[in-house]
Image (cartoon, helix red, strand yellow):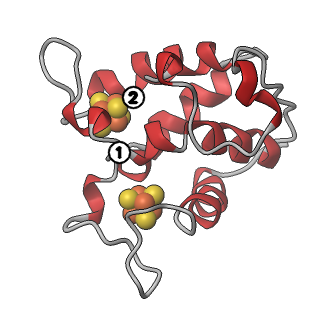
Amino acid sequence: MDRSLSELEAIVRNKICKVCTSRDVNGECGLEDPTTCALFGLFPQVARAVQRVKSDDIRDYIDAIREDVCSVCAQRAADGSCETREQVQCALDAYLLLVVEAIEEATLKKFYRKGLGAMGGGPLVHPRREARL
Ligand code: SF4
Ligand code: SF4
């Protein structure tokens, strides 16, 4: 199903922001500068990365995010490391599986959880550490 970028962003915001630990008591983004949220600050790149992958393995999505999003993210260090990710402060990294599911549900694309090991059958908010960005 074709969705506009703004429709997709609204769907993903509705799913992710309400579970995000950076939300404040009023339900608003609690970041000092909400535009620094990599998930929505780079949402066009995120949506493209997820939609270009045709795989049932989350690691392929992680690779795509790393190539298409982290590569242009201001928070990534020159050596490819990311302090924000290490501190579990990147909503894209922290909620990657939910982001992929939301985008694929919205576009009627089926995503299976291969590659997630024991976490594959349970409620998921974070991929395994070794499967992170
Ligand atoms: S950090 Fe990002 S995902 Fe979390 S509440 Fe703010 S805008 Fe939403
Ligand atoms: S993991 Fe780091 S470099 Fe990648 S999108 Fe998140 S903040 Fe940016």
Determine contact: label 2, label 1, CB under 8 Å: yes
Extreme bottom residue here?
Answer: 26
Q: Name the side, left or right, on which 35 lies relative to 5.
A: left
Q: Where in the figure is residue 93, as x and y percent of width and height?
A: 45, 36
Q: Which residue is mark 1?
A: 38
Mark 2 Cβ inside 8 Å of ligand 2: yes
Q: Where in the figure is residue 59, as x and y percent of width and height?
A: 60, 14
- Tell me the element at label 2: loop
- Which residue is located at x 65 percent, y 45 percent? 98
Q: Name the side, left or right, on which 76 lies relative to 21.
A: left
Residue type at mark 1 is Ala
Q: Residues within 10 Å of mark 2 (few under 14, many from 20)?
A: many
Extreme left residue here?
Answer: 78
- Which residue is located at x 41 percent, y 79 percent? 28
Near-viewer residue (49 or 63):
63
Note whether 113 is above or below 109 in the view shown. above
Q: Where in the figure is residue 10, as x and y percent of width and height?
A: 61, 63
Near-viewer residue (50 or 79):
79
Q: Residues within 10 Å of mark 1 (few under 14, many from 20)?
A: many
Q: Which mark is first along the chain, 1 or 2?
A: 1
**Marks 2/1: CA–CA distance:** 8 Å
Mark 1 Cβ inside 8 Å of ligand 2: yes
Note whether 93 is above or below 34 in the view shown. above
Q: Name the side, left or right, on which 69 lies relative to 19.
A: left
Note whether 22 is above or below 84 in the view shown. below
- Which residue is located at x 23 percent, y 15 percent? 80
Residue type at mark 2 is Val
Q: Which residue is mark 2?
A: 69
